[in-house]
Every structure is written in C-alpha cells, then in structure tokens.
C-alpha cells in the first residue's frame, strides 16, 4: 500500500473548500491510487463549519481518505505537508485600496509561509488560490527561505480553462482539439489569454478564428472578466470551477502535462520573456519530473508584447507595494 500524501487546505470552510475537499478525498488531486491525509486550516470562527464538512467527508467513506484533522494554527496545519492549497484569503472590502488589501493578505500569507518553512515535508508544493494570488504566493515564498522558490505557484488554470472553452465555442470544436493556449501575467483583469501560439486540430488557432476584432474585443475581455460575470450571475464567486482548476494544476504538476501540449501556471520567473526574475507570473508551462518548465522560444509579436508587459507591470507594482510594507 502507498504511503498517504498529506494535503493541507486553508479556507477549508469556504465555498471553494467545499467544492475541493471531496474531490481531493476521492483521489482526483493526485491519482486514483494515492491515499490522502487532509489537514484543514481555518480561522477559529469557522472551525465548527469545517468540522461539519469533515463529518460529510466521513460520510462519503472514501477508500483513499486516511484522515481529516482540523486546525486554527498554521504551524500545526502545515506539519508534514506535501501539498498545500492556500485558498483562504482576505477579500477586498468596500473602499479598500489595493495597498490595504495586500497588507491584510500579508497578515495571512507571511505566517503561512513561515509555517511551511518550519514544518512542511521536504517535497512540499504550494498552490495559492486566494487572491491576489500571485502576490500572496510571493509573500508566502519570501518567508520560506528553506523551500525552493519554484515550489510556490499561483493559480491561473481557471483562466486557462475558461479561455479553452471560449475558443472551442467560437470555432465549434471540442476542447480536446485545442492545444498550446497560454495565460500570461497576473490572475487579474490585466491577464493576457494568448491564442497566437495555440493550435486547433494542428492548425494555428488565431488564423482559424481569422477575426482580430473578436480576439481583442470579445475573447480577451470575456476571459479576463469572467470572474465578475460569474459573481453577477450566481451572486457568489466561482467556486466549483476554481476547485476544479486547482485539481487540474496540482495533478499536472505532480503527474506531468501531456506530450505535445502545455498549460498555464504562475511560478517565479527566471527572467524569460522579459518577466523580471522572481516575479510570480503565469507562463506557458510543461511539467516534467514534478517540476514546471517554461515553454521556450515562442515568437512574441507587438500585440502580445504589449499585453504581457502590462500585466507583468501590475505584478511588479504589487511586488513593490508589498516590499514597501515589509512583507517580502
Ligand atoms: P470564501 O469566503 O467562501 O472562503 C474563504 C475561507 O477562508 C473562509 O472560510 C475563511 O474563514 C477562510 N480564511 C480566512 N482567513 C484565513 C486564514 N488566515 N487561514 C485559514 N482560513 C482562512 O471564499 P472562496 O469563494 O472559497 O474563495 C477563496 C479565495 O479564492 C478568494 O480569495 C477568492 O478571491 C479566490 N479565488 C481565486 C481564483 C483563482 O482563479 N485564482 C478563482 C476563484 C476564487
């Protein structure tokens, strides 16, 4: 029998947590033969709700679920953790400036980075979902000096999946026919969903669309503002689709991406494509042997360059703000 993998989920009593935990426990995060030990982290007021979710996890009698433990202390929650899903974050309150939001989240992601550094397993992988995800990941990473920096990722897989479906619908094809789509930059409205390198049935996707105005005025804004459109429609932010994307991200990170395709993931830049080193930006990425590698050598034309630069500039500004606040 395999040794259980310890998965820590923060914000476990939230919306995404509720959509995520059952899928992890059923084996979809790591594989259908990998037992899981869940460690849930919540704030004290939400521990009771997390206990309710844990009761339901019990009631599923998942064969792969080894145990569920609930904590309101980060050091305990990350003890021995192999995979950390940092979902709990501080939402933007009315009238809150970006600096205030980053500062409030620093109060969460700094101690969580420290706790990961102190107690997580040597192979720990961290995916930050809670917004602003890229900069929260940067804060956590900078407080975990003993963990390789590339183990801290932020999630842009939901944006990637959204873009896949928008493009497939436009072309009247199955998502299975589309490859090599990229989300560049920040998980925010400045993100750049790039179909100029994407393929549909082996042909160039942008050429197959053949409509620059659709790309500029419909596709890109629809993907970038999809989160707001979901809130408008549901009265609550994306939860099941966000949980699904987190599963996709970690599954691919651990098990590898398919040959002749790539996905989108945010991790510390090595300076590629003009993204300053250390900035946690989304790239076209393949996973090999448990590590992300940036897809090299793509030609970036002026249209794409401008959009990548704008999103990366936003990330640089967020980094500068958290630096001034002493959070990195
Ligand atoms: P939610 O408000 O339903 O749940 C958040 C949970 O986090 C709450 O139960 C809260 O008690 C908990 N929490 C707050 N501070 C915590 C701390 N210090 N430690 C542990 N738990 C803590 O929110 P929801 O809908 O589950 O979303 C979670 C986050 O994911 C939000 O920041 C949201 O913006 C983000 N998100 C990111 C997406 C992405 O694509 N990267 C997509 C959708 C949401």
Image (spheres, rainbow, N blue to C red):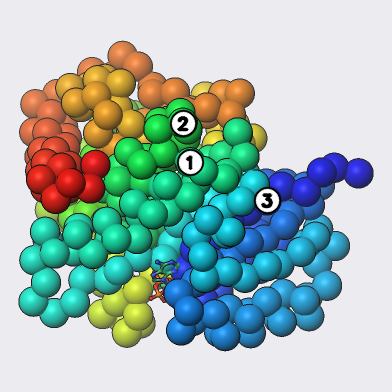
| Residue at point 22%, 54% (across, down) | 188
Pick the front one: 10 or 72: 72
**Residue that mark 3 sits on:** 6
> Residue 49: percent from the left, percent from the top?
55, 84
**Residue that mark 2 sits on:** 146
In the rendering, which numbered label is found on residue 117? 1
The secondary structure type at the circle numbered 2 is: loop
Q: CA distance from mark 2 to mark 1?
A: 6 Å
| Residue at point 48%, 41% (across, down) | 117
Residue 279 lies in what quarter of the image?
Answer: top left
The secondary structure type at the circle numbered 1 is: helix
Q: Classify residue 108 as left or right of residue 192.
A: right
Q: CA distance from mark 3 to mark 1?
A: 15 Å
Instruction: Check disc 1: other Cα within 10 Å, few if <14, some if 14-19, many if 20+.
Output: many
Discs 3/1, front? 1
| Residue at point 63%, 84% (across, down) | 52
Cβ–Cβ under 8 Å for marks 2 and 1: yes
Instruction: Check disc 3: other Cα within 10 Å, few if <14, some if 14-19, many if 20+.
Output: many
The secondary structure type at the circle numbered 3 is: strand
N-term mark: 2 or 1? 1
Pick the front one: 130 or 224: 130
N-term mark: 3 or 1? 3
**Is ligand 1 closer than 8 angstroms to the Cβ of mark 1?**
no
Q: CA distance from mark 3 to mark 2?
A: 19 Å
N-term mark: 3 or 2? 3
Mark yes or no: residue 52 visible. Answer: yes
Pick the front one: 115 or 301: 115
Pick the front one: 169 or 127: 127
| Residue at point 50%, 60% (across, down) | 74
> Residue at the top extreme?
297
Up the image or down, 256 lies above or below 324; here it is above
**Is ligand 1 closer than 8 angstroms to the Cβ of mark 3?**
no
């Amino acid at each position: 029998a395999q040794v259980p993998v310890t998965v820590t989920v923060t914000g476990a009593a939230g919306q995404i947590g509720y959509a995520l935990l059952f899928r992890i426990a059923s084996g979809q995060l790591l594989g259908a033969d990998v037992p899981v030990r869940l460690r849930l982290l919540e704030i004290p007021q939400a521990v009771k709700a997390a206990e309710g979710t844990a009761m339901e996890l019990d009631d599923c009698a998942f064969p792969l679920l080894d145990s569920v433990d609930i904590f309101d202390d980060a050091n305990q929650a990350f003890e021995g953790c192999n995979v950390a899903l940092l979902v709990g974050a501080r939402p933007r309150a009315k009238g809150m400036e970006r600096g205030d939001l980053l500062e409030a989240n620093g109060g969460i992601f700094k101690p969580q980075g420290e706790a990961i550094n102190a107690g997580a397993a040597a192979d720990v992988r961290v995916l930050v979902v809670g917004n602003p995800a890229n900069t929260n990941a940067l804060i956590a990473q900078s407080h975990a000096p003993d963990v390789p920096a590339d183990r801290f990722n932020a999630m842009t897989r939901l944006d990637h999946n959204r873009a896949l479906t928008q493009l497939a619908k436009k072309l009247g094809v199955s998502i299975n026919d589309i490859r090599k789509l990229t989300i560049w930059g920040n998980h925010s409205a400045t993100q750049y969903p790039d179909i100029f390198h994407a393929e549909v049935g082996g042909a160039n996707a942008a050429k197959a669309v053949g409509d620059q105005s659709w790309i500029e005025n419909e596709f890109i804004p629809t993907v970038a503002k999809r989160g707001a459109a979901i809130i408008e429609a549901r009265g609550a932010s994306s939860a099941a689709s966000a949980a699904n994307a987190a599963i996709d991200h970690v599954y691919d990170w651990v098990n590898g991406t398919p040959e002749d395709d790539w996905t989108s993931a945010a991790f510390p830049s090595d300076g590629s494509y003009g993204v300053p080193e250390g900035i946690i930006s989304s790239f076209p990425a393949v996973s090999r042997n448990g590590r992300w590698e940036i897809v090299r050598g793509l030609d970036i034309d002026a249209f794409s360059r401008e959009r990548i630069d704008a999103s990366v500039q936003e990330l640089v500004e967020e980094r500068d703000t958290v630096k001034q606040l002493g959070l990195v």
